[in-house]
Image (cartoon, rainbow, N blue to C red):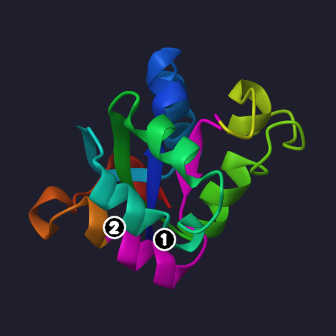
Amino acid sequence: METTLILLKPDTVERGLIGQVIARIEQKGLKINGLKMIQLDDAIIAEHYDFLADKPFFPGIQAYMKRTPIVALAVSGENAIATVRVLTGATNPQEALPGSIRGDFGLTIEGNIIHASDSAETAEKELQRFFRWQDVFEYSRGIDWIL
């Protein structure tokens, strides 16, 4: 069982797509262990996107990620990281397959709807960045007994 981080970005919030994106995650059979809406500040954006901090487009990312609150989710399941990455689709919505979240909802690479951790190591760091341990819950669902 893996747990991964998903961020629903400002364009998801602005376009009223939060429920539709969460529904796809749940319909896939993944379990939401933590969920919260937060307004990001420069410090957390700089930490989260530290690998892009020296790029000329970083100020645009910073402004975009502060435009509205975002929704952070801790999501678990068998192979959750890879499963979420497939659900999410290619980073550039123009290259994302139909049926993926970005393929169906993404408009531009600058506003690409969703972030998903790309590895177990990244997921662990990112989950700690956005959630305190008491904000992530373990519980059983009826479907878990069937699987």
- Image height check: is 54 above or below 7? below
Q: Residue at x 66, y 67 (%)?
A: 82
* Residue type (three-letter) at the residue carrying disc 1: Asp
Q: Residue at x 38, y 78 (%)?
A: 124
Front one among 88 and 11: 11
**Residue 127 image label:** 2
Task: Tell me if mark 2 has few (under 14), some (14-19) or many (20+) residues whose alpha carbon lies within 10 angstroms of its own.
Answer: many
Q: Residue at x 38, y 37 (%)?
A: 66
All told, the count of numbered labels is 2
- In-image side of 18 versus 52 (left or right): left
Q: Based on the displayed image, in which of its 4 quarters is residue 69 positioned?
A: top left
Q: Earlier in the sequence, mark 2 or mark 1?
A: 1
Q: Is residue 70 left or right of residue 50?
A: left
Secondary structure state at the residue bearing disc 2: helix
Q: Would residue 69 be counted in the magenta stretch? A: no
Measured along the vertical axis of the image, is residue 125 above or below residue 138? below
| Side of 87 where 14 appears, left or right | left
- Residue 88 position in % (x across, y down): 67, 47
The furthest residue to the bottom = 121
Which residue is painted at 47% across and 52% down in the image? 6
Residue 70 location (% of width, % of height): 37, 37
Task: Give the mark toward the camera: 2 or 1.
Answer: 1
Residue 61's label in the rendered image is none
Q: Please report the bounds of the magenta region as a residue range.
A: 111-127
Residue 22 is situated, as x and y percent measured from the top left of the image, at 47, 34
The disc at residue 50 is 1
Disc 1, SS: helix
Q: Specify the amino acid type for callout 2.
A: Leu
Residue at the left extreme, as displayed: 134
For the residue pair 102 and 55, the one nearer the viewer reads as 55
